[in-house]
Image (cartoon, rainbow, N blue to C red):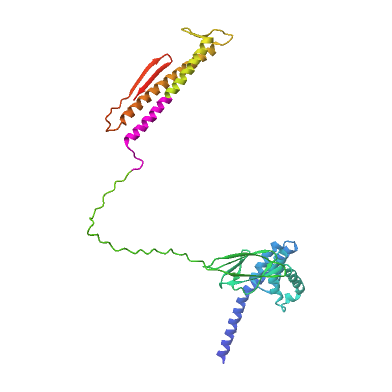
């Protein structure tokens, strides 16, 4: 009997200690919740519901009671989140026997009415089961959703996605007091189609005909399509050199004629002697102008000689090329002669092939 009484006393001591230890965090949480609610109410009285909202959210996470739910719902309504406020105010009013709810039932009911007047409902259904439902960038659950989604009256974006399926996105307008319904049936991601492999059927070897000789394959020498006979290329170069010779000689002739015109104009108003260039009539032309005319004549004469000389060189080159490009089996001999002689108008070159 004494041992049984001692055992009961020992058990009661253990139970009391456990209750005491378990109540310490609860009392600590309750004190923290009171501080958070007090701070949030102070900010609401100052007209700062947005700044007060985090304090009520922390209090609700620490202790989810009708009081913390109701305080959070009131703050959310003031901060412009009617859909969230509707859920938390409804949670507070669902506990009619709670002393805090009984005391503030009228205020909570009035706030719930205001929240209901600013929200609509959205029903999302479809397949596959377990697909993630995202509304306005926030995940609200997976298919099938257990209840409707409360949303503030505005345009909402709904995204449904699942692994191995093509995601779908739709926009819907949420109206006050109305229920919108959306159905998403996601299609599986199509598998890549592999191209069919061609079937190659080998042909049996054909025996050679007895009356046809077997000819071994002959080696094929590659031919360069751009390569032509050397004589043709040389003849082309000869024609190019001949044409260039004519162009150079023509340029020399034109410059020679211009030089003659310049020296004639010089002789009208100017003189040239061993003493230098001078003017005949200073009132008409100055000595500097006479010197410039004489210098122009010398330059024109020099370049005309260069043109004649270049034409002669190109003509010689053309003749040599024509001679080198003669046919190998030709019975006639090809001859090229270049004759240059001075004339009153300059130098005259003549080529004979």
Q: Which residues are magenta?
A: 224-247
- Residue at coordinates 46% horizontally, 16% vertically from top-left? 298
> On the rendered structure, is 71 left or right of 197?
right
Instruction: Considering the whole magenta stretch, tell me its main secondary structure.
Output: helix
When asked about the image quadrant of residue 71, the answer is: bottom right
Residue furthest toward the front?
A: 211
Res. 1 image quadrant: bottom right
Q: Position of residue 350 (x, y in %)?
A: 37, 21
Judged left or right of residue 299, residue 82 is right
Residue 45 visible: yes
Query: Which residue is at a point 39% across and 30% down the rendered structure image?
Result: 240
Residue 29, x across and y down, in percent: 64, 71
| Nearer the observer, 33 or 326 | 326
**Residue 303 percent location from the top left of the image:** 44, 20
Write the residue at 32% across / 35% down.
Answer: 230
Relative to 32, 278 lies left or right: left
- State the residue at coordinates (36%, 30%): 238
Instruction: Judge by depth and name the residue closer to the eye, 343 or 160.
Output: 343
Q: Is residue 150 magenta?
A: no
Q: Is residue 59 above or below residue 208?
A: below
The C terminus - image quarter: top left
Q: Quadrant of residue 69?
A: bottom right
184 over 256 or under it: above or below: below
């Amino acid at each position: 009997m004494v041992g049984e009484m001692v055992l009961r006393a020992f058990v009661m001591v253990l139970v009391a200690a456990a209750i005491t230890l378990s109540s310490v965090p609860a009392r600590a949480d309750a004190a923290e919740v009171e501080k958070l609610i007090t701070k949030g109410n102070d900010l609401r009285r100052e007209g700062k519901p947005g700044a007060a909202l985090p304090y009520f959210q922390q209090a609700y996470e620490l202790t989810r009671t009708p009081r913390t739910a109701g305080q959070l719902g009131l703050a959310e309504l003031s901060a412009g989140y009617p859909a969230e406020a509707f859920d938390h105010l409804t949670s507070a009013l669902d506990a009619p026997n709670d002393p805090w709810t009984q005391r503030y039932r009228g205020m909570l009911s009035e706030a719930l009415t205001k929240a209901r007047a600013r929200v609509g409902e959205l029903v999302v259904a479809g397949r596959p089961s377990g697909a993630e439902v995202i509304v306005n960038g926030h995940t609200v659950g997976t298919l099938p959703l257990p209840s409707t989604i409360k949303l503030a009256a505005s345009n909402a974006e709904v995204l449904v996605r699942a692994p191995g399926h093509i995601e779908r996105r739709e926009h819907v307008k949420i109206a006050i007091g109305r229920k919108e319904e959306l159905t998403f049936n996601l299609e599986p991601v199509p598998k890549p189609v592999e191209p069919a492999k061609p079937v190659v059927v080998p042909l049996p070897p054909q025996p050679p005909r007895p009356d046809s000789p077997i000819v071994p394959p002959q080696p094929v020498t590659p031919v360069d399509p751009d390569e032509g006979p050397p004589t043709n290329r040389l003849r082309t170069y000869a024609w190019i050199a001949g044409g260039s010779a004519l162009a150079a000689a023509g340029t020399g002739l034109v410059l020679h004629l211009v030089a003659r015109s310049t020296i004639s104009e010089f002789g009208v108003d100017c003189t040239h002697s061993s003493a230098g260039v001078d003017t005949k009539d200073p009132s008409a032309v100055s000595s500097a102008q006479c010197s410039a005319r004489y210098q122009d004549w010398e330059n024109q004469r020099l370049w005309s000689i260069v043109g004649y000389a270049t034409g002669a060189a190109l003509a010689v080159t053309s003749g040599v090329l024509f001679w080198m490009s003669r046919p190998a089996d030709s019975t006639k001999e090809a001859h090229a002669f270049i004759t240059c002689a001075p004339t009153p108008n300059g130098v005259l070159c003549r080529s004979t092939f």
